[in-house]
Image (spheres, grey):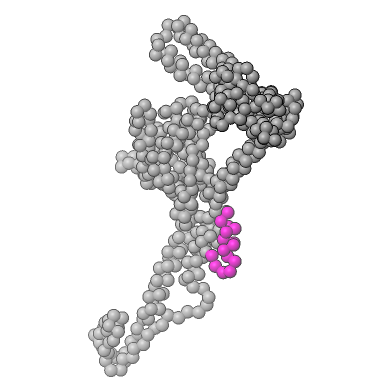
Amino acid sequence: MLQKRKFALIGRDWSVEPASEDARDKDAAALVGEIVGRIGFDQLCLDLLDATLKGFAVAEIVWTRDGARLVPDRLVAHDPRRFAFDEDWRPRLLTMAAPMDGIALPERKFVVHRYGVKGNNPYGLGLGSRLFWPVLFKREGVAFWLTFLEKYASPTPVAKYPLGMLPEDQRKILSALEDMRQAGAIVVPLGTEVAYLEAARAGQAGYAEWCRYWDQQMALAVFGSTLATHVEGQGSRAAAETHKEAEEQIVDADADLLADTLQRTLFRWIIDYNMPGAGVPTLRRPRPRNESAHEELRTKRVANAKAELELLFDLAARVPPEKFAEMAAALAGVDLMPQVPLDVLKRLAPHLARARLALTDAARAGALPVPQAANDAAAQAMRQIAFGADAGSDAAHDHGWGALADQVETFAAPMIEGWVAQVRAELDAAIARGEAPAQFGERLLAIEPRLAIDPLGRLPGLAMEAAELIGRGDVKDEIKAKRRRRR
């Protein structure tokens, strides 16, 4: 049953999730995922889950260098009986010279996973404390059961000899009875009566019920229910499926406890050695059913976003230009289009409205060309009509990307100038103190966490989103203009 509980966890897919949406935290999660993916991670988790039974489990990290990085080469599980703990819960190795307190061990060398920790007990309290008596009683019952089966399969032969028979003759009869089990036939003196002592008992209690009872007690201790391991009678399957949810919750708890241990030890040490200052990622082992639900939710969100964009383009085609920005912002304000940020709508509205109006006027006048390819002469002429006299420039050929790039540069300039100012201030301070270049390099490493990169990282994303909406608006207007021309 314990193996079933552990394998239920190991059988789930795992992923390393970043501590935040920061690019550095995402790189840290990718690094940890790459490293643990090649060290036999599932076997490590299986070894650490021994703490569920024993209270704690220990695995030793064998560090190695991989270029400029310090990474685990492998992790080796050890017998927990070889370890003790000091007052700070640090593991100590028991040796012949120190069999009680043990000897100190290197820091960041051993991963210790604990289960059932109460108060100041660093050894934990595993399920073995609850399983000891059920296992012992079942074993004793099986021993008695085997003895009973032996008696039932081969009854005890009994010989009744006449009064006054010599001891030597009695021993001969006893020897003959012992041979009778194998030979099946014996020879005894005249007057000796041989019979079988049959095993007989009454009542409903039996050895099978005894063993089944203790199996149920062990199942209750391990899984919290018995129906998942003992399905009996009509309708029991439905009940077992109901209790399966409770078992999944126990496996979820095991996954959370193990993820917490790995985050505090192995993951943190990898980050501290290779990407100091980055957020420590977390381990996820979701249920397969939950993962399917998440995937379905992501699919629905994509479909909703697509529907909202279609609503936006349809709005640009039907609403007068001077009303487009106001109505689009109003729709976003009441969360009818939550996938499109409000500031993006406000910046995008004038471009879409003006382009739609220009193309509509050209179509009514019969001067709208029909392009056959994305970059042919007709397409260039259409872009010129939509975006004005500058449409023949490189910026127009990329659907306004040049203008968006200029805006990104404008918004990014203050952030970059702020970085340069911080570095310049540290350089001036280093020169004033007469520090060597190496010391200044260490100072730069110290200020690196203060250089906020999130705002700068969001700018290209907003520009890409706006450019995509502009492009889709162009295509939408082009299709509508072609339909009007055919009419």
The answer to whether residue 240 is magenta is yes
The residue nearer to you, when weighing 417 against 183, is 417
The residue nearer to you, when weighing 336 against 62, is 336
Span of residues in magenta: 231-245
Is 67 drawn above or below residue 159 in the view shown?
Answer: above
Q: Determine the residue positioned at 68% across, 25% down.
A: 362
Q: Determine the residue positioned at 27% across, 87% down.
A: 186
The answer to whether residue 465 is magenta is no
- Quarter of the picture holding the C terminus: top right
The image quadrant of residue 303 is top right
- Report the residue that reaches farthest toward the bottom: 190
Say if residue 228 shows up in the picture.
Answer: yes
Residue 229 is left or right of residue 462, and the answer is left
Is 32 drawn above or below residue 466 in the view shown?
Answer: below
Is most of the magenta stretch helix, strand or loop?
helix
Query: Picture coordinates of residue 113 (x, y %)?
Result: 45, 42
